[in-house]
Protein backbone atom coordinates (compact mmCIF):
# COMPACT_ATOMS: atom_id res chain seq x y z
CA UNK A 1 0.00 0.00 0.00
CA UNK A 2 1.25 3.43 -0.93
CA UNK A 3 2.36 5.57 2.01
CA UNK A 4 3.09 9.23 1.56
CA UNK A 5 5.05 11.23 4.10
CA UNK A 6 5.62 14.96 4.26
CA UNK A 7 8.36 16.72 6.13
CA UNK A 8 8.25 19.03 7.95
CA UNK A 9 4.78 18.86 9.45
CA UNK A 10 4.89 22.57 10.16
CA UNK A 11 7.09 25.40 9.01
CA UNK A 12 7.24 29.06 9.94
CA UNK A 13 9.37 31.45 7.89
CA UNK A 14 9.77 35.22 7.55
CA UNK A 15 8.40 36.85 4.45
CA UNK A 16 10.71 36.79 1.46
CA UNK A 17 12.46 33.57 2.35
CA UNK A 18 12.78 30.69 -0.11
CA UNK A 19 11.64 27.34 1.22
CA UNK A 20 11.40 23.66 0.32
CA UNK A 21 8.68 21.22 1.25
CA UNK A 22 9.41 17.52 1.04
CA UNK A 23 7.25 14.58 0.06
CA UNK A 24 8.26 10.94 -0.03
CA UNK A 25 6.31 7.92 -1.21
CA UNK A 26 6.94 4.22 -0.78
CA UNK A 27 5.67 2.85 -4.09
CA UNK A 28 7.22 4.32 -7.23
CA UNK A 29 4.35 2.99 -9.37
CA UNK A 30 2.54 6.30 -9.57
CA UNK A 31 1.13 7.89 -12.70
CA UNK A 32 1.65 11.41 -11.44
CA UNK A 33 2.30 13.49 -8.37
CA UNK A 34 0.29 16.56 -7.49
CA UNK A 35 0.84 19.31 -4.98
CA UNK A 36 -2.27 20.85 -3.46
CA UNK A 37 -2.93 23.81 -1.26
CA UNK A 38 -5.54 23.49 1.49
CA UNK A 39 -7.03 26.61 3.02
CA UNK A 40 -9.48 26.54 5.94
CA UNK A 41 -13.04 26.82 4.69
CA UNK A 42 -11.99 26.22 1.10
CA UNK A 43 -11.41 23.20 -1.02
CA UNK A 44 -8.08 21.79 -2.08
CA UNK A 45 -6.51 23.64 -4.97
CA UNK A 46 -4.16 21.85 -7.32
CA UNK A 47 -0.91 23.79 -7.63
CA UNK A 48 1.28 21.64 -9.80
CA UNK A 49 0.97 18.26 -11.47
CA UNK A 50 4.01 16.27 -12.50
CA UNK A 51 3.51 13.32 -14.80
CA UNK A 52 5.61 10.23 -14.07
CA UNK A 53 7.66 10.90 -17.21
CA UNK A 54 8.51 14.43 -16.11
CA UNK A 55 11.06 15.63 -13.60
CA UNK A 56 9.73 19.05 -12.72
CA UNK A 57 7.02 21.62 -13.25
CA UNK A 58 7.01 25.34 -12.65
CA UNK A 59 4.23 27.82 -12.04
CA UNK A 60 5.17 31.33 -11.03
CA UNK A 61 7.09 31.20 -7.77
CA UNK A 62 6.45 27.48 -7.39
CA UNK A 63 8.64 24.70 -8.68
CA UNK A 64 7.98 21.02 -8.05
CA UNK A 65 10.34 18.18 -8.81
CA UNK A 66 9.79 14.45 -8.98
CA UNK A 67 12.28 11.63 -8.62
CA UNK A 68 10.34 8.40 -8.97
CA UNK A 69 13.35 6.17 -8.45
CA UNK A 70 13.99 7.58 -5.00
CA UNK A 71 10.33 8.11 -4.21
CA UNK A 72 10.66 11.82 -3.58
CA UNK A 73 9.12 15.07 -4.62
CA UNK A 74 9.89 18.59 -3.48
CA UNK A 75 7.95 21.82 -3.71
CA UNK A 76 10.08 24.92 -3.84
CA UNK A 77 8.48 28.26 -3.02
CA UNK A 78 10.49 31.33 -3.91
CA UNK A 79 10.20 34.69 -2.18
CA UNK A 80 7.48 33.55 0.19
CA UNK A 81 4.57 35.85 0.98
CA UNK A 82 2.04 35.92 3.83
CA UNK A 83 -0.59 34.84 1.35
CA UNK A 84 1.30 31.58 0.91
CA UNK A 85 0.30 30.58 4.43
CA UNK A 86 -1.71 27.37 4.10
CA UNK A 87 -1.37 23.62 4.36
CA UNK A 88 0.37 21.99 1.42
CA UNK A 89 -0.44 18.43 0.49
CA UNK A 90 1.25 16.13 -1.96
CA UNK A 91 -0.62 13.24 -3.48
CA UNK A 92 0.39 10.37 -5.70
CA UNK A 93 -2.12 9.14 -8.28
CA UNK A 94 -1.97 5.38 -8.78
CA UNK A 95 -4.46 5.14 -11.61
CA UNK A 96 -7.59 4.87 -9.56
CA UNK A 97 -7.05 6.94 -6.45
CA UNK A 98 -4.92 9.53 -4.71
CA UNK A 99 -2.69 8.74 -1.78
CA UNK A 100 -2.27 11.93 0.17
CA UNK A 101 0.51 12.98 2.49
CA UNK A 102 -0.20 14.37 5.94
CA UNK A 103 0.60 17.88 4.83
CA UNK A 104 2.94 20.69 5.78
CA UNK A 105 1.40 23.65 7.55
CA UNK A 106 3.19 26.76 6.34
CA UNK A 107 3.09 30.13 8.06
CA UNK A 108 4.79 33.08 6.43
CA UNK A 109 5.38 35.88 8.91
CA UNK A 110 5.10 39.44 7.58
CA UNK B 1 -12.46 27.16 -12.70
CA UNK B 2 -14.91 24.47 -11.72
CA UNK B 3 -16.54 24.87 -8.32
CA UNK B 4 -17.67 22.22 -5.89
CA UNK B 5 -19.69 23.14 -2.83
CA UNK B 6 -20.52 21.23 0.31
CA UNK B 7 -23.34 21.70 2.76
CA UNK B 8 -23.26 22.08 5.64
CA UNK B 9 -19.77 23.42 6.32
CA UNK B 10 -20.03 22.14 9.86
CA UNK B 11 -22.49 20.12 11.84
CA UNK B 12 -22.84 18.89 15.40
CA UNK B 13 -25.07 15.93 16.07
CA UNK B 14 -25.84 13.63 18.93
CA UNK B 15 -24.62 10.08 19.08
CA UNK B 16 -27.03 7.69 17.42
CA UNK B 17 -28.50 10.18 14.99
CA UNK B 18 -27.89 10.38 11.25
CA UNK B 19 -26.50 13.31 9.34
CA UNK B 20 -26.48 14.03 5.63
CA UNK B 21 -23.75 15.94 3.82
CA UNK B 22 -24.31 17.29 0.33
CA UNK B 23 -21.73 17.76 -2.38
CA UNK B 24 -22.64 19.76 -5.47
CA UNK B 25 -20.83 20.60 -8.66
CA UNK B 26 -21.96 24.12 -9.51
CA UNK B 27 -20.84 24.63 -13.08
CA UNK B 28 -20.10 21.24 -14.55
CA UNK B 29 -21.51 17.75 -14.70
CA UNK B 30 -19.82 15.52 -12.18
CA UNK B 31 -19.78 12.05 -13.63
CA UNK B 32 -17.60 10.78 -10.82
CA UNK B 33 -17.50 11.95 -7.24
CA UNK B 34 -15.19 10.95 -4.45
CA UNK B 35 -15.63 11.12 -0.68
CA UNK B 36 -12.65 11.54 1.61
CA UNK B 37 -12.24 11.65 5.36
CA UNK B 38 -9.51 13.56 7.14
CA UNK B 39 -8.74 13.09 10.83
CA UNK B 40 -6.68 15.74 12.65
CA UNK B 41 -3.01 15.61 11.76
CA UNK B 42 -3.69 12.80 9.29
CA UNK B 43 -3.94 12.63 5.54
CA UNK B 44 -7.07 12.53 3.45
CA UNK B 45 -8.27 8.97 3.06
CA UNK B 46 -10.52 7.91 0.22
CA UNK B 47 -13.77 6.45 1.50
CA UNK B 48 -15.64 5.74 -1.69
CA UNK B 49 -15.98 6.52 -5.37
CA UNK B 50 -19.38 7.04 -6.94
CA UNK B 51 -20.52 7.29 -10.52
CA UNK B 52 -23.82 8.93 -11.34
CA UNK B 53 -26.65 6.46 -11.34
CA UNK B 54 -24.73 3.51 -9.98
CA UNK B 55 -23.75 2.17 -6.60
CA UNK B 56 -20.70 3.59 -4.89
CA UNK B 57 -17.48 1.62 -4.63
CA UNK B 58 -16.21 1.64 -1.07
CA UNK B 59 -12.62 1.35 0.04
CA UNK B 60 -11.58 -1.50 2.27
CA UNK B 61 -12.52 -0.88 5.87
CA UNK B 62 -15.31 1.61 5.10
CA UNK B 63 -18.72 0.35 6.15
CA UNK B 64 -21.13 0.89 3.29
CA UNK B 65 -24.17 0.48 5.55
CA UNK B 66 -22.89 3.19 7.85
CA UNK B 67 -21.77 5.65 5.20
CA UNK B 68 -24.55 5.77 2.64
CA UNK B 69 -23.61 7.45 -0.61
CA UNK B 70 -26.12 8.52 -3.20
CA UNK B 71 -25.16 10.02 -6.55
CA UNK B 72 -28.56 10.43 -8.10
CA UNK B 73 -27.76 13.30 -10.44
CA UNK B 74 -24.80 14.70 -12.34
CA UNK B 75 -24.50 17.62 -9.94
CA UNK B 76 -25.28 16.14 -6.55
CA UNK B 77 -23.90 13.43 -4.31
CA UNK B 78 -24.84 12.90 -0.69
CA UNK B 79 -23.07 11.15 2.15
CA UNK B 80 -25.23 10.06 5.05
CA UNK B 81 -23.53 9.02 8.24
CA UNK B 82 -26.01 6.71 9.93
CA UNK B 83 -26.13 6.11 13.67
CA UNK B 84 -23.20 8.45 14.15
CA UNK B 85 -20.76 7.91 17.00
CA UNK B 86 -18.04 10.17 18.41
CA UNK B 87 -15.38 8.24 16.48
CA UNK B 88 -17.08 9.37 13.26
CA UNK B 89 -16.17 12.95 14.09
CA UNK B 90 -13.95 14.06 11.27
CA UNK B 91 -13.55 16.39 8.31
CA UNK B 92 -15.35 15.04 5.26
CA UNK B 93 -14.30 16.29 1.82
CA UNK B 94 -15.83 15.50 -1.53
CA UNK B 95 -14.34 15.96 -4.95
CA UNK B 96 -15.80 15.72 -8.41
CA UNK B 97 -14.70 15.24 -11.96
CA UNK B 98 -16.43 15.27 -15.29
CA UNK B 99 -14.92 12.04 -16.57
CA UNK B 100 -14.76 8.37 -15.70
CA UNK B 101 -11.28 7.39 -16.79
CA UNK B 102 -7.80 8.57 -17.60
CA UNK B 103 -6.83 12.17 -17.10
CA UNK B 104 -10.33 13.17 -16.05
CA UNK B 105 -10.15 11.01 -12.94
CA UNK B 106 -7.18 12.79 -11.41
CA UNK B 107 -8.28 16.26 -12.42
CA UNK B 108 -10.61 16.45 -9.46
CA UNK B 109 -12.22 19.57 -8.04
CA UNK B 110 -12.49 19.55 -4.28
CA UNK B 111 -15.20 20.88 -2.04
CA UNK B 112 -14.44 22.99 1.05
CA UNK B 113 -15.20 20.15 3.42
CA UNK B 114 -17.68 19.50 6.21
CA UNK B 115 -16.63 19.34 9.83
CA UNK B 116 -18.70 16.72 11.65
CA UNK B 117 -18.69 16.57 15.43
CA UNK B 118 -20.64 13.81 17.15
CA UNK B 119 -21.31 14.38 20.83
Image (cartoon, coloured by chain):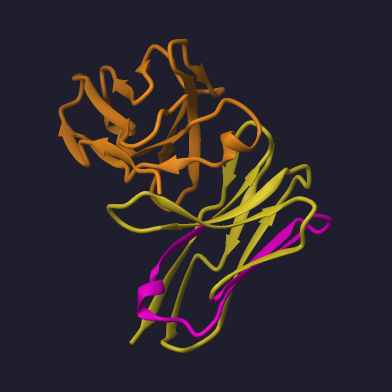
Q: Is residue B69 above or below residue B1?
A: above
Chain A, colour shown: yellow
Figure chain in orange: B
Residue A72 in magenta?
yes
Residue B104 is a magenta residue: no
Task: From the viewer's perspective, tell me whether residue B42 is left or right of residue B40.
Answer: right
The quarter of the rendered structure image containing the N terminus of chain A is top right
Q: Quadrant of residue A110?
A: bottom left
Q: Residue at x 44, y 17 (%)?
A: B52
Which residue is found at the position 44% from the left and 42% from the top?
B109
Query: For this rendering, which residue is in front, B10 or B51?
Result: B51
Q: Is B59 rendered above or below residue A57?
A: above
* Horizontal and vertical percent position of residue A43: 36, 49
| Residue at (49, 47) in percent of width and height | B43
Residue closest to the eye, B64 or B87? B64
Q: From what the image shows, is residue A67 above or below residue B12?
A: below
Q: Residue furthest right?
A: A69
**Which stretch did the figure color magenta?**
A61-89
The x and y percentages for residue B65 are: 39, 11
Viewer-side residue, A20 vs B14 = A20
Residue B93 in which image quadrant? top left
The number of numbered badges drawn on the structure is 0
Q: Is residue B13 left or right of residue B28?
A: left
Q: Residue at x 22, y 24 (%)?
A: B19
Q: Position of residue B86 (x, y in %)?
A: 27, 32
Which percent across, then down, holds residue B13?
Answer: 16, 30
Amino acid sequence: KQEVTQIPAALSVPEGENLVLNCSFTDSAIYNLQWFRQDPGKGLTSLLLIQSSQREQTSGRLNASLDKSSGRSTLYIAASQPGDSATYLCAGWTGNQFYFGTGTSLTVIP
Amino acid sequence: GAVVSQHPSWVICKSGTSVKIECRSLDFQATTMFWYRQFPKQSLMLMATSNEGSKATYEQGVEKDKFLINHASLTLSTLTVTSAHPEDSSFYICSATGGTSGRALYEQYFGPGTRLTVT
